Amino acid sequence: MNLAGQPGHKDEAVFGTRHCRVHGAAYRAGRLCGRGQGGDGVAAFVLIHGAHDVGWYWHLVEQELRARGHETTAPDLPCEDDTAGLADTVAGAAEHLRGSDLVVVAQSFGAFTAPLAAVRLRARAIVLVTGMIPAPGEKPEDWPANTGLWQAVAEQAVRDGGKTGSGDPLVTFYHDVPRDLAVQAVRNGGRPQSDTPGRSPWPLSAWPAIPTRFILCTEDRFFPAAFMRRVVAERLGIVPDQIAAGHCVALSRPKDLATMLAGYAATHGGAPGSTS
């Protein structure tokens, strides 16, 4: 999917190689995992991956959440399907958990899907992790131009010597991921990404009335932190929480990310830094 909207732009290739990750049969099956034990603060997490990606992206966070008694599902969404739009993507995310105490979590491009899934599932919270916050009627392929992403990338690249927006995924996405894990992710390749979701206008008329948190990655070399902070303020009207990590925080700091997610699950209703 060309989300850049700028054919030939050097960052268009970076967007196209957004995630290159291995995926196993268990993750392709979109299985439900966990040892939910009930009680205060225990939740079921629907974990939505980004463009070109698979549920495997979340596997380390899932381990941490399940160890704390939560349930998780991280289904592979239909990235390759040219006939699939956002509604189909929601159906894939929603299929495995119904009627539970749900928190919907989404990475990057998954933020276009998260609120749709949350409404359908009657989730009690949404958490966006360095997510592309949509505006009503906005097509994902228009998001970079509408938000000023490429200008922000170019400005940060000047300051960091070209690391931001680099064509090397180990530099842009995996720079703080343990080397063996990063190499494994790159070696195993990514999934084709259909253009269909990128051309589908976001169907909601407003952000849903569900408590929402945003986790900003301060070392992100794809969505610069200052840029993302502005977009969060403009589109959600909240102050994001922060973690010192790059774009692929679920691989670089899974324990710390899981701690934040578990903390949100323990918070009932709206909270500072959340929409409600």
Image (cartoon, rainbow, N blue to C red):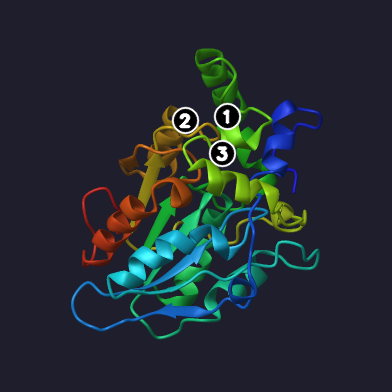
Find the residue positioned furthest to the left: 40
Of badges 1 and 3, the one in the foreground is 3
**Image location of residue 18, percent across then percent down:** 65, 44
Of badges 2 and 1, the one in the foreground is 2
Q: Is residue 26 visible?
A: yes
Name the N-terminal-most of marks 2 and 1: 1
Name the N-terminal-most of marks 1 and 3: 1
Q: Is residue 54 left or right of residue 108?
A: right
43 versus 248 height, above or below: below
Q: CA distance from mark 2 to mark 1?
A: 8 Å
Q: Is residue 11 left or right of residue 152?
A: right
Q: Is label 2 in a helix, a strand or a loop? A: helix
Where on the picture, by quarter, is residue 22?
A: bottom right
The residue closer to the viewer here, 210 or 128, is 128
Q: Which residue is mark 1?
A: 148
Q: Are marks 2 and 1 in contact (CB under 8 Å)?
A: yes
At x 81%, y 63%, the residue is 82
Q: Of the residues shown, which amino acid type is indicated by label 3?
A: Phe
At x 61%, y 41%, the residue is 143
Q: Which residue is mark 2?
A: 227
